[in-house]
Amino acid sequence: MKRALSEVDGKDWNVAEFAAREQAWQRSRRDHLRCLACGGHASFRAETKDRRPTFAARHSSTCTLRNRTPWGVFRYLQ
């Protein structure tokens, strides 16, 4: 996911903006995130040699992001 909602500050974070913050700040917030589409618990996955930074979530069974409908209103978040 490219965007997630922070439970700490209520902000809609872009993954690039979140990844640009210092590591201590990221650690304090990485497990306090929610999917914008379904509200499922989300977390931040830092960049590694083989992977770009991303948000990962436990989506509900009806989540637009999980079902990946091509016409979904939240398609831009994928």
Image: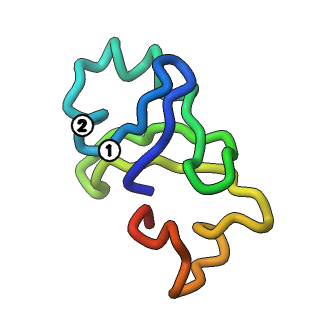
Name the quarter where the N terminus is drawn: bottom left
Direction from residue 46 to residue 73 in the image, left or right: right
- In the rendered image, the residue lying farthest to the bottom is 70
**Residue situated in front as seen by the camera: 18 or 48:** 18
- In the rendered image, the residue lying farthest to the right is 61
**Residue situated in front as seen by the camera: 52 or 38:** 38
Residue drawn where x is 28% and y is 53% of the image: 52
Direction from residue 76 to residue 35 in the image, left or right: right
Residue drawn where x is 52% and y is 87% of the image: 70
Residue drawn where x is 69% and y is 64% of the image: 63
User: Could you tell me which secondary element the residue under label 2 belongs to?
Assistant: helix
- Quarter of the image holding residue 77? bottom left
- Quarter of the image holding residue 61? bottom right
User: Could you tell me which secondary element the residue under label 1 belongs to?
Assistant: strand
Direction from residue 20 to residue 14 in the image, left or right: right
Position of residue 2 measured from the top left corner of the image (x, y, whole percent): 38, 54
Does 71 appear above or below 73? Answer: below
Position of residue 69 measured from the top left corner of the image (x, y, whole percent): 59, 83
Q: Circle 1 sits on which residue? A: 14
Position of residue 76 measured from the top left corner of the image (x, y, whole percent): 39, 68
Position of residue 72 measured from the top left corner of the image (x, y, whole percent): 55, 77
Does 52 appear above or below 46? Answer: below
Q: What amino acid is at disc 1?
A: Asn
Q: Circle 2 sits on which residue? A: 17
Direction from residue 17 to residue 43 in the image, left or right: right
Name the quarter where the C terminus is drawn: bottom left
Instruction: Say few, some or many: other residues with alpha carbon within 10 Å of mark 2 (under 14 / 14 to 19 / 20 or more).
Output: few
Cβ–Cβ below 8 Å for labels 1 and 2? yes
Separation (CA) of disc 1 from disc 2: 5 Å
Does 12 appear above or below 2? Answer: above
Q: What amino acid is at disc 2?
A: Glu
Residue drawn where x is 32% and y is 44% of the image: 14
